[in-house]
Amino acid sequence: MLGVPAHPGAIGYGLLLLAVVILGLELPAVRRRARDPAERLAAIAIAVLVAVTPYLAWRVVEDLRTTTAMSAYDRSVAGPVQAYLQPYLLDPVRNIIPPNATYATVVGPGVPYDTAKRAFPSLAMETLFPRLSKSVDDAQWIVAWGATPGSVAHVGHVIVAQRRSGVYPAVLVARVQR
Amino acid sequence: MMFNLGGLLLVNACFLAAGCGVAGLAGWWSGPRGVVRSLGVCYLVGIAAFGMGAQLLYVLGASLARWQVVGICAVLALGSIGALRRVSPPVAAIRLPTWVIAVVVAMLALLAVDLWFQPLWAYDAWSYWTPRAHALFALNGLDPGWFGAHDMRDPDYPLLLPAIEAATFRFTGYETQLLDVQSLFVLVAFLGAVVEVTVRLNGRRIVLAAVLLSLVLAPSVADQLASAEADIPIAALFACAGLCAAVWLEERRRGALILAGVLAGGAAATKIEGIVFVLALFVAIMVVQRRALLFPAAVGLASLAVGIVPWKIWLSIHHIPEEVTLHRLLSPSLLGGHIGRVPYATGYLAWRTLDPRAWILLVPVCLAIAFWARRRAGGIVWLALVGATLALAGLLIAYWTTPLPFHYHLATSARRVVTGPIFYLAALAPLLARREPES
C-alpha cells in the first residue's frame, strides 16, 4: 500500500500492545471451549486475528490518509514517482520522434538511482506509445539519459529534450545516421 | 470515475454470466438457488474462461471490441439455460457467527474504500501489466511489434490479465485507478468459493472462520490488492481449482474436475508460474487418485493446452524470445552451476510463506491442521499438502535457474508468488478438519 508507514510508530506500537492485552483476555476462553486440536488451532488463530484487527485496520486508514490527500495529477503519475522518475521526463520527446518511428533507450551512469535506471525504458514505452522500442542497431532514434547518443550509434544533431534538473541528468535525443 | 465504476460493474457482470454458463454446463450448480450459492466459483470460472478465450482470439487476430466481449460472455452464458431448469439439491446450512461475518464485511468495505483511492503505483502494474492491457485496447489487438518490442520485459508472459483489463477498458475507457477494485472482486469471489465448497463438503465451521478472517485481514493480501498485479488473480484461480478438485475427489462428478481444469488453465494463462501450479495440482490429484489416472491426466493436459499453447505458438511465429524455457528449468549444467542458490532460496521462500507480518498465523495453522488431519481427512489432506509443496518446489526451481540477478529477483517477487500455494492450502484447510460423520 502506498501510504502505510514503514514503521508502526507510537500509535501502531500502542495498538500492537493492545493486541497482546486482548489476546491475554481471550486465551483462557479458547482453552476452555476447544474440543480437539483442529478447533484449538483455529480458535488461537481467530483470537490472534481479533487482537490484531485494530492494528491492521489502522494500517489501511493510514494508507487512506495518504491517498485521499493526493491530487488527481499525483495519482496519475504515482507509478513513475515511486520509481524515482520525473513523470514528465519524456513528454518533450513525443514532439521530436514521429509516431511511426522506432527508438532505443540508453541509460548511463549519470542517473543516480538504480530503480530509476531500470524503470526508464518502461517510462519510455508508456510515454512514447505507440512508437516501438528497438535495439540500438535497429532503431531510428536514440533516447539517452545520463549518456550521449553518440556513445552508442552514429547520430546526427543531438537535441536536448529535457534539461538537467537537480540530480537528474538531461535527456538527449538524436536521429541515427545509417 | 463513478461513471467508469458502472462500466466496471457491467463488464464484471459479463464475466459472472459467462462463468455461470460454463459452471452450469459442467453441472456444478442446479436451479436458481444453486447459482446464487455458487456465485464465487462462477465468477472465477468466468474470468478464467473469458481470459483464455480472449487470449486465443487475440492470437487469431481479433480486436475484442466491446460487442465482441459481450458476445463471448453471452455465448458462454448459454450454459446456464439447462442448469436453471434443474432442481437445486438441498444443502446443509453452515452458520458462521454474526461477528465473524461483520468483521469480514467491514474489512472488505474498508479495503474497497482504500482501493477506490489507490493510484496505480506498483512497479509491475504501471510498467508492465497495465501497458500490455493498454496496448491491446489502443492498438485493437495483439501487435507483434509492440509486444515483441526490445524494451518489453518478460515478453513471454501470457495474456489473461491484460485481456481482462483490456476488456474492462472497453467499458470504462482507459481508467487505471479501478484496476485494484477489480482485484477485490476476485478476492471476494474466492472467499465465496471457499465458503461454498466448505458447506458442500461439510468442512469445519471454526476453521472456515479462521481462514476467512485471515484472508481479509492479512497485510499481504491488502498490499497486493493495492498493487493491481497478477498475483491475487493467479492465486485465487489456482486455489479455486484445488477446491473443485477436492469436490471431484469426494463426489466423483466429472464436471467438478473439468471446472478445476478451466480454472487451472486460467492460472496458466495468467503468469509463467501458473504452469507450475497446474502441474502441482494435477500431480497431487494423481497421487491421491492412484488409479484411473487417464481422466485427470487428460484434463490437466487440456488445461495447459488451452491456457498456454496458443500463446506459445504465437510467440514462436513472431520470433519473440522466451525467457523461461523447459530447457532452462531442466538443464543439468545450469542446475549444477547454480546449486549454491538452493539453500538460500529455500530459506527465503519458507520465510516469505510463514512471515507473520504478511500472513499472520494462516500458514502455520493450516499446516498444523493438515498434520493433525493426515490420517483422518482422506485424500484431501494429500491433495493440499502435495499440491502446495510441489507448487513451492516449482517456484524454487524458477529462482534456482533465474536469468535475473538472483537476490534482486527473490527480493522483488518472492513475497508475491508464494500467495498461490498459501491460498491453495488455506482454501482446503476447512475440509481437512471435517468431523467424522456421527453414526
Image (tube, coloured by chain):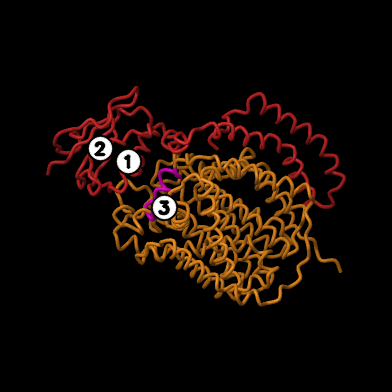
Chain colours: A red, B orange
Q: Earlier in the sequence, mark 2 or mark 1?
A: 1
Q: Are marks 2 and 1 in contact (CB under 8 Å)?
A: yes
- Quarter of the image with the C terminus of chain B is bottom right
What whole-number distance in Å separates the C-alpha atoms at marks 2 and 3?
A: 25 Å
Q: Nearer the viewer, residue A8 or A127?
A: A127
Type of the residue with mark 2? Val
Side (left or right) of B182 relative to B326: right
**Above or below, comparing residue B99 to residue B199 in the picture:** above
Q: In front: mark 2 or mark 3?
A: 3
Residue annotated with mark 3 = B133
Would you say the magenta stretch is mainly helix, strand or loop?
Answer: helix
Which residue is found at the position 49% from the left and 33% from the top? A71
What whole-number distance in Å separates the C-alpha atoms at marks 2 and 1?
A: 9 Å
Tell me residue B84's x, y (percent): 65, 74
Numbered badge on residue B145: none
Q: Chain of mark 3?
A: B
Mark 3 Cα-neighbour bin, 10 Å: few <14, some 14–19, many ≥20: many
Residue annotated with mark 1 = A124
Which residue is found at the position 48% from the left and 41% from the top? B120
- From which residue to which does the magenta span run? B124-137
Type of the residue with mark 1? Ala
Residue annotated with mark 2 = A143
Q: In the rendered picture of this protein, how many numbered marks are placed on residues?
A: 3
**Above or below, comparing residue B255 to residue A144 in the picture:** below
